């Protein structure tokens, strides 16, 4: 599927109008609900297929971040055949007490996978924790980079941001259709 068409479909599914209160407390008439494209199995599969060429060749494990990165990494793993790790925001206090569930990350080249990147803050935190566990992390891959400082934040911890789409791609897809 062509990137512009994929961007149009994501925007069509995830762009909502109404009255929404953002995390900042600001009320807005528009909202981008990323979980709507993640909940559509056909669209999510097409997104994952389009992301495959962006996965660095040296990648040994795909690490999806809680919560939005989990469905994306699972779909991407199906297309690449790579094992997946599911990374919590903090290690659970019971059972295995692990931060990263699923595939082992120690001593392996790990690609962090996220749905949407805004500030990049959670990727930075999770990357530091994965590195402390012995993972070699050089890149993070996302479906959408909102272009609001995430890439720069990741550069600060020697991490390259790879993005399938940018916020401008979503806007362009709507205006060209």
Image: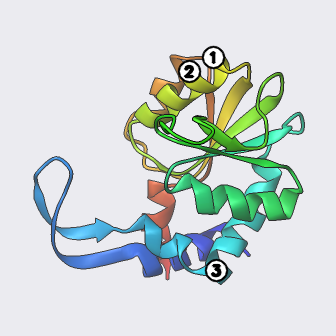
Task: Locate residue 58 relative to residue 122 in the image: left or right.
Answer: right
Q: In this figure, which residue is indicated by the disc labeled 3? A: 41
Residue 120, visible in the rendered structure? no
Q: Secondary structure at mark 1?
A: helix
Of the pair 88 and 41, the residue shown nearer to us: 88
Residue 4 locus on image (x, y percent): 61, 70
Disc 2 to disc 1, C-alpha distance: 6 Å
Residue lying at 61% horizontally and 35% vertically, measured from the top left: 98
Q: Dots 2 and 1: beta carbons under 8 Å?
A: yes
**Quadrant position of residue 85:** top right
Q: In this figure, which residue is indicated by the disc labeled 1? A: 132
Of the pair 54 and 175, the residue shown nearer to us: 54
Question: Compared with residue 78, is residue 12 higher up or lower down, i.e. above or below?
Answer: below
Earlier sequence position, callout 3 versus callout 1: 3
Q: Secondary structure at mark 3?
A: helix
Question: Compared with residue 74, is residue 14 higher up or lower down, i.e. above or below?
Answer: below
Q: In this figure, which residue is indicated by the disc labeled 2? A: 128
**Quadrant position of residue 139:** top right
Residue lying at 47% horizontally and 36% vertically, measured from the top left: 93
Q: Residues within 10 Å of mark 3 (few under 14, many from 20)?
A: few
Q: Secondary structure at mark 2?
A: helix
Task: Locate residue 118 relative to residue 94 in the image: left or right.
Answer: left
């Amino acid at each position: 599927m062509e990137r512009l068409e994929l961007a149009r479909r994501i925007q069509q599914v995830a762009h909502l109008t109404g009255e929404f209160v953002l995390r900042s407390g600001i009320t807005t008439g528009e909202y981008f609900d990323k979980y709507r494209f993640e909940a559509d199995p056909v669209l999510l599969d097409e997104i994952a297929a389009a992301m495959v060429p962006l996965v660095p060749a040296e990648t040994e494990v795909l690490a999806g971040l809680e919560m939005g990165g989990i469905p994306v990494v699972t779909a991407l793993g199906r297309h690449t055949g790579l094992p997946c790790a599911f990374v919590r925001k903090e290690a659970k206090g019971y059972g295995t007490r692990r931060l990263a569930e699923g595939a082992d990350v120690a001593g392996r080249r790990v690609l962090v996978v996220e749905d949407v990147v805004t500030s990049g803050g959670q990727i930075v935190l999770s990357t530091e924790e994965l590195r402390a566990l012995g993972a070699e992390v050089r890149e993070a891959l996302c479906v959408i980079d909102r272009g609001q400082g995430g890439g720069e934040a990741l550069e600060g911890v020697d991490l390259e941001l790879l993005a399938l789409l940018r916020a401008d791609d979503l806007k362009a897809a709507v205006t060209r259709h």
